[in-house]
Image (cartoon, helix red, strand yellow):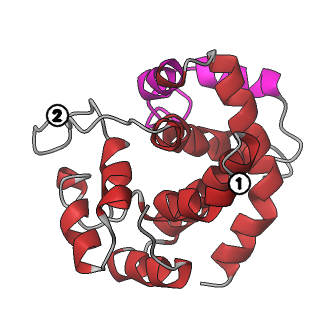
Amino acid sequence: MDYIAREDALALLKRYNQDPFHLQHAFTVEAVMKWYANELGYAEDAEYWGIVGLLHDIDFEQYPEEHCLKAPELLREGGVGEDIIHSVVSHGYGITIGCGVTLDVAPEHEMEKVLFAADELTGLIWAAALMHPSKSTKDMELKSLKKKYKSKGFAAGCSREVIQRGADQLGWELEKLLTMTMEAMKATEDTINAECESL
């Protein structure tokens, strides 16, 4: 398993991403991935899972039409190894991007399946949190999250099809994925906010 130091990964991310929204998403997915690593028995690889989460959308801000196609080039230039590159690209599996290409690198390892499943869902959970008076995930309940999930007009940019496909790839019920990702965000919200404030 190849490795890049977190500070180097962050510097590489910031080379191609300046939008606070995109950086917040990167920090969110990083923190959620580390939480999942600890929960699913991969604690010794938690930092690695986090790096994959941090870098997963490296090409999205500057190359949205080539999302997941441009990433390998940017990552290789930054000295990132092929394991991480495969994981980053696999989160776009089966999705047709702006330039008309359908991405065909499938998630293989459980970590890659978690990234695929949780990526879109973190956006939906943040959007739901912002509807709360507290603007926080910490007082969010599964019932209200499920209601938001079922409302097609809410956070319409977060693909329910991708989230469901992610749960299926993991062999999980959707409710398990919703519950665990919500708990991950509750547990890591302070860390994410601190990262955002340090920018």
Q: What type is the residue that disc 2 sits on? A: Thr
Quadrant showing the C terminus = bottom right
Identify the residue at horizontal 73%, vertical 34% (top origin).
Answer: 180
Going by the image, does 33 lie left or right of 39? left
Residue 173 in sight here: yes
Of 27 and 7, nearer the camera is 7
Residue at 42% of width from left, 28% of height from top? Answer: 162
Residue 131 in view: no
Q: Secondary structure at mark 1?
A: helix
x, y (%) of residue 6? 54, 77
Instruction: Please say if the residues under marks 2 and 1 sit with CB atoms less than 8 Å apart.
Output: no
**Residue 72 occupies which quadrant of the picture?**
bottom left
Mark 2 / mark 1, whichever is N-terminal: 1
Residue 11 is covered by the magenta coloring: no
Q: Which residues are magenta?
A: 142-168
Using the numbered discs, state the Cα–Cα distance from disc 2 to disc 1 in whole angstroms: 33 Å
Q: In this figure, which residue is indicated by the disc labeled 1?
A: 43
Q: Residue furthest right?
A: 139
Name the kind of residue labelled 1 in the image: Ala
Taking the spot 63% from the left edge, 44% from the top edge, the residue there is: 127
What secondary structure characterizes most of the magenta part?
Answer: helix
- Residue at which label 2 appears: 102
